[in-house]
Structures are given as structure tokens and as C-alpha cells.
Image (cartoon, rainbow, N blue to C red):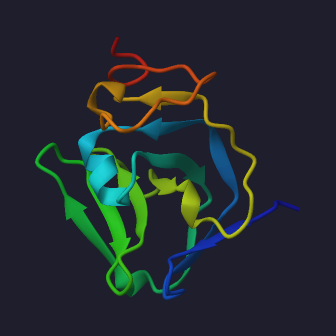
Amino acid sequence: MTHKYYGSCLCGGISFNVTGFSKKAANCYCTMCRKFHGAAYGTLVSVTGLTWLKGFELLKHFTAENGTQRSFCQDCGTSLGFRIKNAGIDEIELAISTFDEDIPIKIDAQIYTEYKANWCELQQGIPSFLQGRNEN
């Protein structure tokens, strides 16, 4: 039987489950992620087997000039997901912080670190990249 990992937004209006994760997860220090998450960085992971259980109609999207799309709850503003330009309907990265339980993921990279805030220190022991993993 496949284990399902459950998550939700802050107000509980949106809930979901997934059946799996990619092997790569990164802390992203780009300006868009920092603003979207209201934090020093955003941490997202690609998922498989995503099912929206409740509140799909509350899910709103912001499309940036570069074509990336960020999804959030219209009621509480929780940052939920991210899609690259031209991604398929099932291709989404979810914010790790929205899961209601621990998930079997280890952060293995710090990306777009050239954009990190001057008051933020990188985490020791995690590889860092000025841009994306394959861009420097």
C-alpha cells in the first residue's frame, strides 16, 4: 500500500495529499521565492501523485514575467506551489512547510544564492549554487 503524505494551507481551506517526492529539494534564495514565502528562502519539492482533497477553488495563481507560476490560498495567503513555464498539469513543486507531517526529504542544495539577503547566512554542509544547480 502506498503511503500518502498530507498537507494544507494555514486556514485549512485547502488540503492535499501526495504519494511521492523527487530526490532533490533545495532552499531557493531568489528574490521571487523570498517574497512569495515571506522568508529568507523558499523550500520546495517536486511531488508525484498529487490529489487536491479540498478547496481547489480557493487556489489562486500568480504568473511572473518569466512565465513561472506560484499558487497560494486566496483566503489565508499560504504559499503552496510553484510551476516552471510550460509545465504540465501534474508538474508542480510544493512548499515543504505546507506538509502536516515530516516527509522523507533532505535538502541537498542551496540555489540562486547570489540573490540572498545580506542578513541571511547560508547553511553549512549543503552545496551552494549562485544560480540553479546546473548553471554555475
Viewer-side residue, 86 vs 105: 105
User: Residue 65, position in %: x, y?
Assistant: 11, 48
User: Residue 134, position in %: x, y?
Assistant: 40, 16
User: Residue 6, position in %: x, y?
Assistant: 68, 70
Task: Give the residue furthest to the left.
Answer: 65
Task: Give the residue furthest to the top.
Answer: 136
Q: Would you say 120 lies left or right of 105 here?
A: left
Residue name at image x 47 percent, y 56 percent: 90
- Compared with 110, 100 (above or below) is below
Give the quarter of the image for residue 18.
bottom right
**Is the C terminus in the top left, top right, bottom left or bottom right quadrant?**
top left
Give the quarter of the image for residue 5.
bottom right
Task: Give the residue furthest to the right.
Answer: 1
Residue name at image x 57 percent, y 55 percent: 96
**Is the N terminus in the top left, top right, bottom left or bottom right quadrant?**
bottom right
Q: Would you say 85 lies left or right of 123 here?
A: left
Viewer-side residue, 122 vs 11: 122
